[in-house]
Every structure is written in structure tokens, then in C-alpha cells.
Amino acid sequence: MAQHTPWGRRLALGAVAVAILGGIAFVMVRSGPLAPVKVTVARVQQGTVQPSVMGIGTVEARRSWMVGPTAASRVLRVAVDVGDTVAPGQLLAEMDPVDLDQRLAALDASLARARSTQAAAQAQVLDATARQQLSAGNLRRNEDLARQQFISPGALEGRQQELASASAALQSAQANASAAAQDAQRLAAERAALAQQRGNLRLLAPAVAVVTTREAEPGTTVVAGQAVLRLVDPASLWVKTRIDQGRAAGMALGQPAQVVLRSQPGQVHAATIARLELLADAVTEERIAQVAFAAPPQGLSVGEMAEVTVQLPASAPGLVLPNAAVLRHNAASGVWRLEADGKPAWVPVKVVASGLDGTVRVDSADDTLGLAEGDRVVQHSQKPVQAGMRVQVVDALVPAATAGTAK
């Protein structure tokens, strides 16, 4: 059997060591710390972005009513219940009239008596008018006789005194008639006011509406202005939406929107912006928009939460790329562009518009290193990208949880 010399053993050991080191180096270069970072890339394209903003809202009614008495009173009966649909003029509830009916009857009697007094006063005016006209005729005849000296001056003075007395009686009768008419007018006004007060005790529906709450039950005493029932117009339901002020630029009346109700998560309802509130919320830094449904969905409830997406006007044509490719580096926004040698270089950009589909419209923030259509930019990477590092472009990144070999 052949014997190995010391130099032969050393050479063999050296060859083994070199093989081991080479294997380690190969592993480090291919899959170890020195391996290229796997990345996915996207192409920069020319196009437009349809920006949208999202907000959380609450279903409210544009038209609602709090129906209650105009004076303190006690609820006599409530004719409707929560959920009932009512028609204009329909009786909703009635308040206890207490003594109003008796007071109306007393006023009716007083008004009838005043009208009788007025009629008597008018008759007295007619009688006084006739007496005054008779006295005036007698005076004219006596004046003719006095000119012809058929009667004495004293007889003429008597006729003049009769006319003056008749004129005074006519004026008195006219004054009494005017007072009687005013008294009747006052009583009629008092009765109309009391009848209006009596009518206000009948709470009527102001329009087609749905009863949402019963605030008081029969026997409850309520004060003036306190609601007995609350109504809403079911055709006026809209969503009061809160939009972040930082993204609300460009919102305008009539812009299309989409509403997803919490009770109907799988359905999208078409809507439009019906009102933009002038006052914003300074605490939450949100702007408030009222979004109206194109057709109110069935089963809609007041107070329900909803997600609202408002579609803003499309951006001007420009460079479009995935939002995931835009990163923050050295306190600036930009993308990692793959150069001709396959290594990444940082390109500052500014985002002009963002769409909910994950795309953004960008402009170059640096004229020297500006993007161009067709450039490849890093979209996702296994590790943070650095300038000049070795990368390997792949179709998809394997999540770390599934990177191992299945057993």
C-alpha cells in the first residue's frame, strides 16, 4: 500500500480547503449576504390618472321636522308610530285642550251679542239720519216763510235748534255704531286667535314623511317647542361626508361619487356631491360634503355609516407609474431607476395626482436625472435598495414565510 508524503497530504488538504472556500463564496454570491437583491420593476408610461378621494360619512336627512305644540300642554293621544309613512295634513298627535272649547263657546256668545248690538246701533243711525233729514227739510221751508214774513224770527230759530239737535243725535248714533262694530271686530279677532290656538293642539304632518322617533307619550306634559314626534323626508336622505382637507382640492358640486353602506358592503350606489359646506372642521382638519344618492337604496337608515369615494377630474397627461415605486429617501420623494448597467440610481420625483387603482402621475423634481417614458423603476424589493447595488429582476418576490422548501 502506497504511503502519502507530508507534501502530498498538505496539497490534498489545501485542495479541500480551496473547494470549501469556493463553495462558501459561491453560496454567499448566489444566496448569501453578497447575493444580488431580488426586485420587481415597472415601466414608466405616458397617461392620465383619475384621482379620487375617500371619506367616511353618516346618512342624514336634508329635510326633517320636529313636530310639537306652540304652548305648554299635555299630550292627549299619539296617532302614529315609528316607521309609519304619513301624508301632508295627516293627524299625528293631539294635545289636551283643557278649557279652550269652553272659552270658544263663551266667545261665540259674546260675539253674537256684539253683532246684535252692532245691528241695533246701525238701526239707531238710520233713525237719527231720518230725523236729521226731516229737521233739515222743515228748516228750509221755514226759511222761505221767514223771508216772506209769514212766520216770526223766533219760530225760525226753533227750527234751527231742531236741526242741530237731530244732527247731534245722528253723530251719537254713528259713534255708537262704530263702537259696536269695533267691539264685534275685537271679539272676532279674539275668537280667531283662540281657534288658532285650539287648532295648534292638533299636530299635523307638514309633508310626505316617515316617523323616526316618538319623543312623548299620552299623558306627558311638554313645553312650547318641545318635539312630540320627529319626521324625515325619505326622498331627501344623503350622506354627510368628511374629507381630509389635504386631499379635498378640486372637489366641486355635481362631481360623481360612489357610496358603500355599512349594511350593504357588497353594493356600490351612484351619487353626486350636492353641497360643499362653507365651514370646515378645524379640529379634525376635514371638509364636509353632502353626497346625494342618484336613487335612494331600499332599507336605508338614518345614522348609518358609509364609505364615500369622490371622483375628481382626470389629471393632465404625463408620466404614470405604480404608487408602490415612489419611496422616501433623504427626506425627498423619488424612485429607484435601473440604469443601463442594471444598477439602481435615485431619481427625485413629485407626485401630482394619485388614483385609487394604485397609480400616480408624477413630474421630475430634477431636470438632470428626470424620468422618461419606458424607464424601468423598482416596484418591490427584498431589501432596501441603495445606489449602485447589485439587483436581480424577477417576476414576483417570494414571501419570506413561504421561501423554504416544502416537506
Image (cartoon, grey):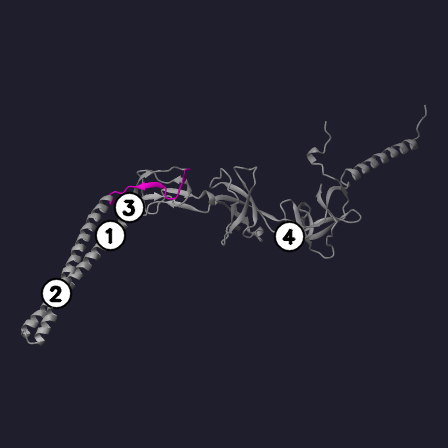
Residue under the image location 24 percent in, 44 percent down? 101
Find disc 4 in the rendering and name its residue: 315
N-terminal of the two: label 3 or label 4?
3
Q: Nearer the viewer, mark 4 or mark 1?
A: 1
Find disc 1 in the rendering and name its residue: 188
Quarter where residue 29 is shown: top right
N-terminal of the two: label 2 or label 1?
2
- CA gap between label 1 and label 3 equals 15 Å
- CA gap between label 4 and label 1 equals 70 Å
Residue 293 in picture, x, y percent from top left: 52, 44
Q: Callout 3, which amino acid?
A: Arg
- Mark 3–mark 4 contact, CB under 8 Å? no
Q: Nearer the viewer, mark 3 or mark 2?
A: 2
Quarter where residue 92 is shown: top left
Crowding near the residue tagged with mark 2, few <14, some 14–19, many ≥20 C-alpha atoms within 10 Å: some
Q: Nearer the viewer, mark 3 or mark 4?
A: 3
Q: Which mark is residue 346?
A: none
Q: Which mark is residue 198?
A: 3
Q: Callout 2, which amino acid?
A: Leu
